[in-house]
Image (cartoon, coloured by chain):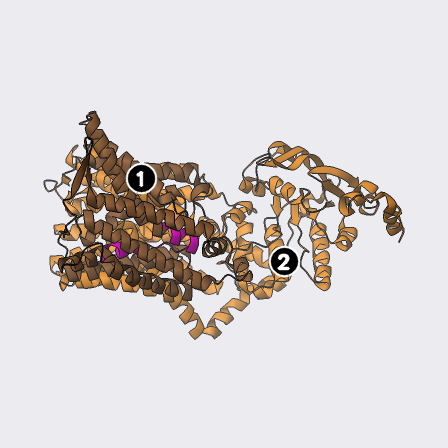
Amino acid sequence: MSAVRGVLGRRTPWLILGAALLLAFVPKLGLPAFYDSLLYLILHWVVLATSWNILSGYTGYFSFGHGAFFGAGLYTTSTLLGRYEWPFLATLPVAALVAALLGVGLGAVVFRVKGVRGELFALLTLAVTFVIGTIVVNTPLDGGQGVSLSAVPVPAIGATQSSTFYLLALMAATVTVLIAWGITVSKFGAGLYAIHDDEDAAEVMGVPTYRYKLIALAISCALAGIAGGIHALFLSYVTVGEVFTIAVPLTVVLMSVLGGSRHWAGPAVGAVAITLLLYSFTAADHAIAGKALTGVILIAAILFMPDGILPRLQKLMRRRTPPAAVGAAHPPSHLAATGASPPSPTSATTAGHGEVLLRVQGLHKSFKGVRALAGVDVEVRRGEILGLLGPNGSGKSTFINVVSGHHMASGGTVTFEGRALTNHAAHRIAGAGISRTYQIPRPFAHLTVLDNVALATMFGGGVASPDEAREQARAWLHFTGLHEKAHALPDALNLHQRKFLELARALASRPRLVLLDEVLCGLTPSEIDDAVALIRRIRDQGSTIVFVEHVMRAVMALTDRIVVFNHGELLAEGAAAEVMQRPEVMTAYLGKPHPPALQQPQERAHA
Amino acid sequence: MSGFSLPSATLLAQSILSGLFVGALYGLMGLGLSLSWGLLRLINLAHFAFAFLAAYLCYQLAGQGMDPLLTLVVLVPAFFALGALLQALVARFAITPFNSLLLTFGLTGIVEAVIQTIWTADFRKLESTYAHLKFKVGVLFVPVPELITFVLAVALSFAVWAVLRYTDLGKALRAAAEDATIAAAFGVNQKRNALLLAGTCSALAAVAGVCLALSFTLAPSQIYAWVGVVFAAVMLGGLGRALGPLIAGSLIGVSEAVTMAVTAPSWAPIVSFTLLIVILVFRPGRVVP
């Protein structure tokens, strides 16, 4: 599969350029001018829908503010043309810049607020559209009457005015589609897809989610700004009422959802289909019927093809040609199986056994007055397996969440390999060499098992090339015994396999320290034996392990040392067999014995 | 910017009053939207189209000599059925909240096309016995159609609030919104309740539509003019809260009216949307269900 994708992948940009080159000869055919205009409109919507998709389709942050960014470009160009008499082509970079700055300014505020996702993000961006529209209409930018550009000369790129616009839009569409494609095959794109599925988990895997969202938004806005700039001159008379509306974003959403918003070409396919459809109805004087039919299509698409046309077609193709796909899938995984690339994450760092790797001092964490951690000191030594124990609610998971950067500490310091990491963003902590698993596995639902692991290789592990990352990820799937499932989606895995996928992801970033949060919970006794053997092998690779667990059999078998938490404080520390005998530890687990029954715990301890 | 001037006290009071009346209509429109979003996770953009369809039907029936308020007897049950039908479709296909937004947008387009086919894109105004009735309280004029809207909005908001708070049905709906599986385990028939609620929401849209017909000029393109400001009222008021849209809607209506009186009418939209942005950025927990 990935071999096929590789070949196709290398050819895709040439196919796009080739198609663009062919399309550039269309004006030479001498078709009536209105064909140029129709083609212009199609390409115009291809740019808008594809650019929208770069943020919204890939990351799932559905923006309804595309009209604002498009409008920002449109009014930038019209102001520069109408008032300052700039040459038209010079206004386009400025239009892109203004739109991008607007997007970055908005994103810098909105992306910091964790709750604003999904429909809230959509409405927020829509509200921004109306605010900006109101400002534009009330200032000299528009003034309420609109801006006329009929006196501005159209540059002579094509033989006629309409062919000039067509060629401009063709260039913009080519660049936009190339960028959209390039992102999907890059590390950046992998990060965006991970944000779509589980933003918190992506951050913990090392994806700089905030920066990535901002960059995606900036690219998306800049391209929409260029489309706006070209469109200003195309319309030659611009009004706020037609730009800063709900119609622009809804149209691009419709196009992308129809075509398939997870695919780089999906929005383009949708844009061509919808524009042609609307045009054919307008041309035949059935604009109202066209509107109704668009509604019907949207409803049918949501109900029957929620993933869009392209993914649906891909699925059909895959079903029709299974032998080829399977044949292509085998060689690489086979190679990885026999190839001499066993995972060697940290062989170099096994030296220095016994020194302090992670030092946590006075760590505090409160949730609105509830003290989950009340100043704990823990040292983890290189090469050991440290068990972290304690009754429910004692602060074990909070400890892992704070050390991994999932939560901010309220006080105290975390030092790893001598570097202060307190309150660093989770992706930087992952990059520094600490990885974690979740008690309830949180795989990226739309990525294959292989890509789930490759993501950690790229971000936590710092591998730049997605192909190289997949190659390494295959080795980690072998290590955890998941290689048969490499191309399955996480949904197809059982709990045991999903726990192992968590482990594979945690290991794939080649961490020096792995935080395991109850990996054994919910497994059957024989599965626990497998997991214990696997954890031993992880340590033998050279990783240090902090191991939160309730399964005492595994704790006794695996740990070199344990620490016990109670009520957010450190209760005891030492070898497992010895610490568990201590009366204060037994009290924490079993409760205080009533005076008459004072003998009982001791009897149990003897037994 | 330009034309910034302080109006006289009477003018200001009159605009506050008219803002309150418009705000009540925002609240009435938002009530059904808020309930369906907060309690059913159905973001029903078609709510606006339903309101306009009801307004046009009211216009049509009133044109044939029926009292506009009497049309409610026909419209409320009809729209109840329509809403229940939509909910049945959404439940059958297990649609996510975001996709429900897109789905109902498609439905809005269809309803808009239907309206445009039957009544054309021209502006229509209901001429009823109420249209020009107004009376004077002190220095202020109180138009009767707006007063009817206000009374209906307040009465219905409080009625819904009481049902949600005190009846078993209301408690079951709130429980199911919080955790449908657990609620079902305790014997809540969410399927039936959802149909009931969705029907009620659409019936509320029909009432809002009649009020719309009483005091506004109708055009199919106007459907979208209400979307932004009513969404702002819904989110400011808190999803699924019966009194929220009324209070937030009145607040927005009044602040818009004051903005219009102090500056130019074209600045009005900035109030509600700035409020919405501020609340989303600083208190997203308030609107997240």
Residue A500 quadrant = bottom right
- Depth order, front residue of A421/B271: B271
Residue at x-position 61% and y-position 55%: A504
Residue A449 quadrant = bottom right
Q: Is residue A194 visible?
A: yes
Hue used for the chain lettered A = orange
- Report the span colored magenta: B34-53
Q: Tell me the amino acid under the disc marked 2.
A: Phe
Hue used for the chain lettered B = brown
* Residue A366 percent coordinates (x, y): 60, 36
* Residue A265 percent coordinates (x, y): 35, 58
Q: Tell me the amino acid under the disc marked 1.
A: Ser
Residue at x-position 55% and y-position 47%: A205
Q: Which residue is mark 2?
A: A500
Give above or below for A314 relative to A372: below
* Residue A345 percent coordinates (x, y): 64, 49
Left-right relation of A325 to B124: right
Chain at numbered mark 2: A
